[in-house]
Image: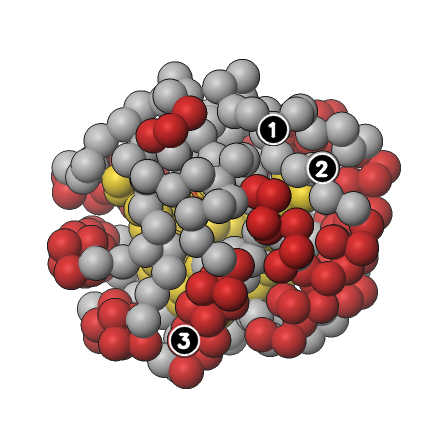
Amino acid sequence: MNKKIFLCSICNINSGTCKEDCKFCSQSVRYKADIERYIQKPIGEIQKEAIAARDNGALGFCLVTADKGLNDKTVNFVCKAAHAVQKVAPQLRLIACNGTATLEQLLVLKEAGIKAYNHNLETSESFYLKICSTHPWSERYETCQNVNKAGMVLIAGGIFGLGESEDDRVSMLNSLASLNPTSVPINFYHHNEALQLSPNLLTVDEALRLIKLTRKMIPQAQRIMVAGGREVMFGDRQHEIFDAGANSIVIGNYLTTTGRAMNKDLEMLNALGFNIAKSVVG
Ligand code: SF4
């Protein structure tokens, strides 16, 4: 068993302003979900969150924007946020998650000190047609290829519990494996009443099996991360995700939902005898 757990914290630096129609996403303006919405989080606030993440053992700090993809304005803001975080918490490993991106845009982020880029395939290419009508799955795949071309660390995963079939899950995992991601974030759909999708019907045992399947189908990934939906999906069985193959979690709040207090996760990891990773190779 891998006894080192990699902790990552996410910072939603632009929230709830996306015009796309991904059916699982409360950040789309189309569904009018009751979430906080803002164009740019104040830099001082981003720095405060970075310091709190570092102080709670996070190694990764992800700057997330809610939009289909990067444009010049977003690139500038992400770079500004990256520089500001480096000033107050240089130990953090910076990650960006800003939707579809060209090779040129990624190279600008890399130059600003961002080591890794997260872009999820979300689900299989065929099921994606039922989940989103405003942009194709192929753009997601291309962005992941661009991350590899840019020489950045690729973080690519998806979301389970959208109503996809087992074939869709296997197809997505095969696509992810073909991209050779360093880290694979797995999300479990967390239903919001404003969204059209039905609630996630996965059982805890099924969700644990999906973590194992991810580990089996992408053995070369250094990290299998359980990200959004962890607390709701696993409840008091969340310690079992590590036996299933996860060696990374998101601590603190998610993009539009509250996670449990960071110290609760640290207590859980401590009680399980895990060490917090202080550095990573990839
Ligand atoms: S493109 Fe991203 S932010 Fe926009 S609706 Fe889809 S998942 Fe949400």
Task: Please provide percent x and percent y for residue 230.
Answer: 63, 35
* Label 1 element class: loop
In the rendered structure, find residue 279 and report the number of the disc placed on it. none
Res 72 visible? yes
Front tag of 3 and 1: 1
Find disc 2 in the rendering and name its residue.
163
From the viewer's side, name the closer residue of 132 and 218: 132
For the residues labelled 2 and 1, the Cα–Cα distance comes to 8 Å
Find disc 1 in the rendering and name its residue.
197
- Kind of residue indicated by mark 3: Asn
Asked if the residue at label 1 sits under 8 Å from ligand 1, the reply is: no
Which numbered disc, 3 or 1, marks the residue that appears first in the sequence?
3
For the residues labelled 3 and 2, the Cα–Cα distance comes to 29 Å
Picture quadrant of residue 238: top right
**Ligand 1 shown in quarter:** top left
Mark 2 and mark 1 residues within 8 Å of each other at the beta carbon: yes
Mark 3 and mark 2 residues within 8 Å of each other at the beta carbon: no
Res 254 visible? no
- Kind of residue indicated by mark 1: Leu
Task: Please provide percent x and percent y for residue 16.
Answer: 32, 32
In the rendered structure, find residue 146 and report the number of the disc placed on it. 3
In the rendered structure, the answer to whether residue 99 lies left or right of residue 154 reads left
For the residues labelled 3 and 1, the Cα–Cα distance comes to 31 Å
Which numbered disc, 2 or 1, marks the residue that appears first in the sequence?
2
Residue at horizontal 39 percent and vertical 17 percent from the top: 34
Q: How many marks can you see?
A: 3
- Kind of residue indicated by mark 2: Gly
Which numbered disc, 3 or 2, marks the residue that appears first in the sequence?
3
* Label 2 element class: loop
Above or below, 199 relative to 205: above
Residue at horizontal 25 percent and vertical 70 percent from the top: 105
Task: Please provide percent x and percent y for residue 274.
Answer: 67, 50
